[in-house]
Image (cartoon, rainbow, N blue to C red):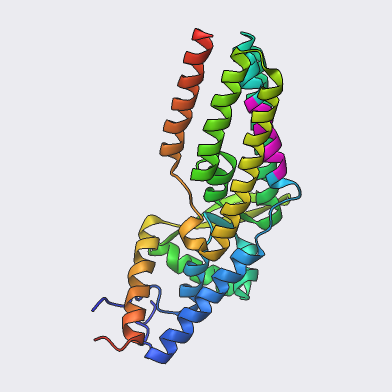
Amino acid sequence: MAELDEHVVAPVRLKIMTTLTAVSEAEFATVRDALDVSDSVLSKHLGALEAAAYLRRHKGAHRGRRTTWISLTPQGRKALTAHIAALRALIDGID
Amino acid sequence: MESKPDRPTAKESAAALLDAETARATLADGIATPSWFFSSIGVAIAVQIATTAAGLGDDAPWVLAAGLAVFAAVAGVQLARFRQVNGVWLGGLASRVVLGTATPGSVSYTIALGAAIWAAYGDRWWLVALWAAVGGAAYTLSGRRWMRTYRVDPAAHARGESLAWLAVMAAAAIGGLAVLVRNA
């Protein structure tokens, strides 16, 4: 059976990564609003996912102010796909 | 150091997955195109088809270049507006809709451009205008269709082609135009 990914197992991280699959990249406030979390919670989980090389952040501008743009890495996409497969197996009771 | 998280139950896993997919769908549904997005791209393509045909038919490469510049300007402005309005970037929108790599857009564009060039060589300018309009309208419809497809399955359509593939396509298109100009 596929293993759950310890970097993605927290529901908020699964939500961040799944949401990012809908775009090539997204601005920090857009992700925060879509997930309905605070700046500090989002920053903390983004930092952890970036440390796992599952996403990358770069500085940019949006509506005239400096902000951070976030995107999944190929490694992050692969990890998410494997994690979701493991979740589905768990849900289906396959062990 | 973070402790290893507990293994979720099947019920928790189902809830977490549903929540994550709902958040993704909400983001995708909230993405809006700026006003006149698809129409302006369609009009720019119609201008580009007409000017390419006219430039080749009349042996006036500057007309062809002007049409390409109009398209590049409209595409650049609309993509910048899209990014500003939504706070996201969709590679699929840029490549499939604006650069026309979606199958309906690329096929209709190729047919319309070929027919317009054929009409221009025969000095049938009303046919050039007609094929340019048809090509632009088809491009617009193809773009709207892609947006509906994206909303159904955003993860499958968000990214579009790689930059390397787009560079190869652009080089092939420029090479093809250069051959046509040289032989005009």
Pick the quarter of the image with the C terminus of chain B: top right
Q: Position of residue A26 (x, y in %)?
A: 58, 58
Does residue B150 appear anywhere in the picture?
yes
B74 sits left or right of B11 in the view: right
Question: Could you tell me which residue is drawn at 48 percent across and 62 percent down?
Answer: B155
Dividing the picture into quadrants, the one containing residue B169 is top left
Question: Could you tell me which residue is drawn at 37 percent across and 74 percent down?
Answer: A84
Q: Main secondary structure of the magenta part?
A: helix
B100 sits left or right of A64 in the view: left
Identify the residue at the far right of this view: B35
Dividing the picture into quadrants, the one containing residue A77 is bottom left
Question: Could you tell me which residue is drawn at 49 percent across and 71 percent down?
Answer: A45
Does residue B102 appear anywhere in the picture?
no
Question: Could you tell me which residue is drawn at 50 percent across and 38 percent down?
Answer: B107
Q: Position of residue A28 (x, y in %)?
A: 61, 61
Q: Position of residue A53 (x, y in %)?
A: 39, 60
Q: Position of residue A86 (x, y in %)?
A: 32, 77
Q: Confirm whether the magenta stretch covers residue B97.
A: no
- Magenta residues? B39-49
